[in-house]
Every structure is written in C-alpha cells, then in structure tokens.
Amino acid sequence: MKDTEHIDLLLKQALFSNIGPSNELNQKIINKVNNHTLKVTYKKRLAFTFIVAVIFLIMTATAFAVWRLLTPEEVAEHFDDVPLAIAFEGEDAIKINKSVSSGGYHFTLLGIVSGEGLNGIKSSVHDIYPDRTYAVISIEKEDGSMIPGFGDKDSESKFFISPLIKGQKPWLVNIASMNGGYRECVIDGVMYRLIECDGIEMFADRGLYLCINSGTFYDIDAFIYDERSGEITPNPDYKGINIIFDLPLDINKADHKKADEYLKELLEPEDDTAGVDHEEPIIDIEKEFENGAVIPESIKEVTFDEKGMAYYEYGGSKVGLSIEHFFKEGETGVWKNTAVFGSDEERILVQIMKDENGVITGRAIKLK
Amino acid sequence: MNTSDINELVELHGKAVYGFCHKLAKNINDTDDLYQETFLKAMELRYKFNKSINPRGFLISIAVGLWKNKCRKNNRRQIIAPTVEFCEDADYSSNLHIASPEDVVISNEINTKVQMAVETLSDKFKIPLYMYYTAEMSIADIASALKIPQGTVKSRLHKARETLKDILSLEVS
C-alpha cells in the first residue's frame, strides 16, 4: 500500500465519528426554534445597550467612528448581494478600517475581498474575468453633517475611487480599464461605495493602492506618479480630494505570470477584427423595448447638480445626463431613451421626458 | 427556513454536524452546546440559507465560526488532545477484520496517535480534515463552505496528510 493511501486509510479510521446527537437535544433545538420570541431579542438588546455604553467610554473617537459604520458585509447585504456578503465574512476577506480626511470628507476603507464567483449579480464581465476584487469605502462629511440621499436635490456622487498598481501608469491602469464598476448608497447620512474590478491579488507583491479623487474620472493632477520607483502619492498642491490608501493584500497570492499576461492584454490589446467568430451578440433594444414594461414606482423628477448635470437614480443605479442633448428647443411630452443598465438577465432602460413647464421626469422600463 | 426545514436539517445532517462539533469540542457538554448553537445560528442566518445548495456546508461553516469565536473568547491557545473517548465511540469494524482483543487495543492506540497528531495541526489544515473525514463532505462542498477555491482545499488536505506522515513517521505502519 502506498504511503498516501495508508495515511488516508488511517485518517478515515481515526477521524470517523459514529457519535450522534440525542433525541432530547434535537427536540430541544426544534422547540427553541419554535419558541424564538421577542423576549430573546429584548434580552439581547439590553445586553447590547450595556455593552455600547461601556465601549463608548473606552473607545477613542476614531475607533468609534469606524465602529458605527456599516461593515462591508452589511453594505453587500444592503445591495441584496448575499454571496458577496458571505465572502466579506470569510477568512479571505481583509478588514482594513483605515480613515483619511480630504476636501471636507472623511473616507474609510472598510474592507476588501477577492476571488471567483463572489458576486450575486452576474454579468458577461464575470464570465470573461471571473476573478474579481471588491472593496467597500464609506464617505462622511467632515463637519458631521449628513450626506443627502440620491433622491435629494443636493445629492452628491463625485468621487473617483479605484485600485492602482505600483509601477503602472495610473491613468492607464485603473478601475475604468480593469472592467470595474461600483454600487453606492446613502444610509443614515453616510455614503457607502462598493467598487469592483478585475482581481488585483495577482499584483499583491508589487504594491497596491486605492486612490480617491474628486470628479468622475482619474485626475492626472491629483497624484504624482514616479516613473522610476513606480510609487503613486497624493499631489500636495492639488485643490480637491486626493487620497491614497495602501492595500495590504497577501503577497503569497501574487502571480507574476498571470499579472504580466493581464497587463499585456490590457495595455497591448490584440486586434479583435482578425478573429472570425468574434462578434458580440447584438442586443436589439428596440425589440426588447416593444415588450418592455414601465416600472410605475420609477417615475420621478431628475435632480441636477450645480453644473446643470441631471441625474436619474433607480434601484441603486444612477445615470448622469446632459439634458440639452436630448431635447430640441420647444420639444415637450416626448420620452427619450437615455441609458440601459442592469445585468444580462435583467436590463433596465431609462427614459426622460420634458413637460411644458420644463420639468424633466425620468422613468425606468424593464426590457424583455 | 421554517420548522420543517430545521427538522429536515437535523434529520439529514444532524449526525455529521454533531460528529464534526465533537471533533472540535472534544467533550459531550461542549459538543451539545456547539451543536445547538449551530442550529440556532442557522435559524438567525436563514436568509442566507438555500437548502438546495450545500446545506451541510452551511451548517458546518457556522459551527466553525462559532467554535473560533468560542476559542478566542476563552483564550484557548491549545485544544486538549483527544482522549480514549474517541475510540469508544467509533466503529472501525469495516476496516478491522480481526476482532481479537489485542488487535482492538492496537487499533485504538493507532487511532489515538493519529488523532493526537491531527490535533497538532493548525485550524487551517485541521478543519478541512474534519470536514472531509468526519463530516464526509466533498471537496467542492468544503470549498463552498470555507469560501476558498477547490484547489486550495485539495492543497490543504495534501499538506495536512504530508505533515501527518512526518509526525507519525509512519510508526503505525
């Protein structure tokens, strides 16, 4: 018998368990489940209140600030992404809880997790690049005021948040080029952003950052990229938000070969036109629209920012619109198609309409 | 998850979960507690539960989490090595064709040595071993329960076996 088989047999024998729970124990569990009353919750809450009181006395202000924020798993749960919430609870997830203030905001990098199949919301990107990285960042007003919700007039979402790789030009390799995206929400005056992009663990031994700057895109003026060392640092002369967090990923998960191949593909894409059967499936929005249905609760006025940019938000997704491109002068009462979002399984078309008073209304249509 | 689901879980997976809890907890009282807490926690986390996807893994992963919390809480740095109680409970008849009292004693000694050797491993290696050999979970189910790739599970099991071979120095052969 081979050693391997021998040890396998020994383990089977030694770790086999023939012991089982008693009927009384099983019955006790079933009774407890049936009698799961509010009384238990009340007791727990009392104890919880006491613990909060004690913790409040001994915690520093910073620790308290982090403590009262949602955890990454709670943020994922808020987006109904249970698989991702479970991943954030898993042993491969990294809790970071580091905070930096800039431009009147207080940013906390809460946690990060990487892996395959962690996301509950599937799209074609996940099929092509199954290995993904997810991170959760909270954003608070430094003066303690509440960040308005997306439906409010003063709603704000003007941060570019992205992982960066030491040694790679940040304007070329960032969340936008790495098949990234984000979901965000405002809960109790705190904004939470859940970003995702292609997996970055393969770069773990090169040095990884998470950058935040004002605006919607990477701002080349916000950071200094040292071509020689590859380091990326905030530009002290920049007027606006510019933050760099270090991402403490496990260097044992680095994969040089995979990383080089990824960068090669990203920075020197091959000419796809050479392929024969390489056509993207054509999505016939018009046909899907014919069978689509307006979601009644989605009909609402768009909001505007100080620059006149209009925003329509529905179901956690937000579309920025430049209204002048959609309506001719004097054109009213006509619904105009703007954007399609959602997953491969469920596509939502956003339409806007201007009435005779100049009010712009948006609505979402579930395509079929 | 409702009462009938709990009944079903207890019936289908109760023994495997209990055996797994026993490997971690070592004594009956702690095993009962861990087993009971596992099902009550499962009830709390019922929104995450899908009975068509690896229900045993769902329960076992809860048991692992509870056990780790308990260890942290009690500041147990080392778990006491198993006693002869293991051997009394186990049924090795399928692997032992000779029933002489001497062979039973030798077999029990071997099993105790293996169990003690397993105890020297870190949780990272020990828990997948218990999941595989005690809870009789597949590699895929272990990977899903621990949220790690299947390759990592295989690698941990392989490393655990290799380490055990070194520890035992095959003296039991």
Image: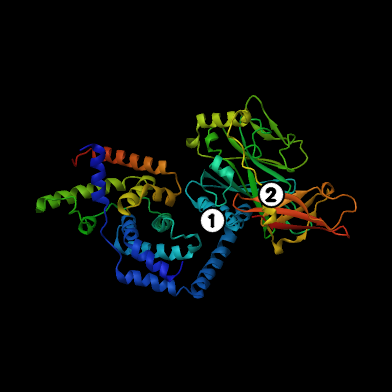
Using the image, determine if residue A256 lies above or below residue A129.
above
For the residue marked with disc 2, what is the amino acid? Ile
Percent x, y of residue A119 = 55, 49
Q: Residue furthest right?
A: A330
Q: Residue furthest top?
A: A228
Gap between marks 1 and 2 measured at Cα: 30 Å
Examine the rendered structure and indicate whether residue A95 appears above or below residue A279: below
Badge 1 marks a residue whose secondary structure is: helix
Neighbourhood count class around disc 2 (C-alpha, 10 Å): few under 14, some 14–19, many 20 upward: some
- Chain of the residue on which disc 2 is drawn: A
> What is the x, y in percent for residue A25?
33, 69
Q: Are marks 1 and 2 in contact (CB under 8 Å)?
A: no
**Residue A304 visible:** yes
| Mark 1 or mark 2: whose residue is earlier in sequence | 1
Q: Which residue is at 49% across, 46% downward?
A: A92
In the structure shown, which secondary structural element does the residue marked by tag 2 occupy?
Answer: helix
**Residue under numbered circle 2:** A285
Please check whether the numbered discs 1 and 2 fall on a single chain. Answer: yes
Location of the C terminus of chain A (image quadrant): bottom right
Q: Which residue is mark 1?
A: A82
Residue A13 in the figure: left or right of residue A67: left
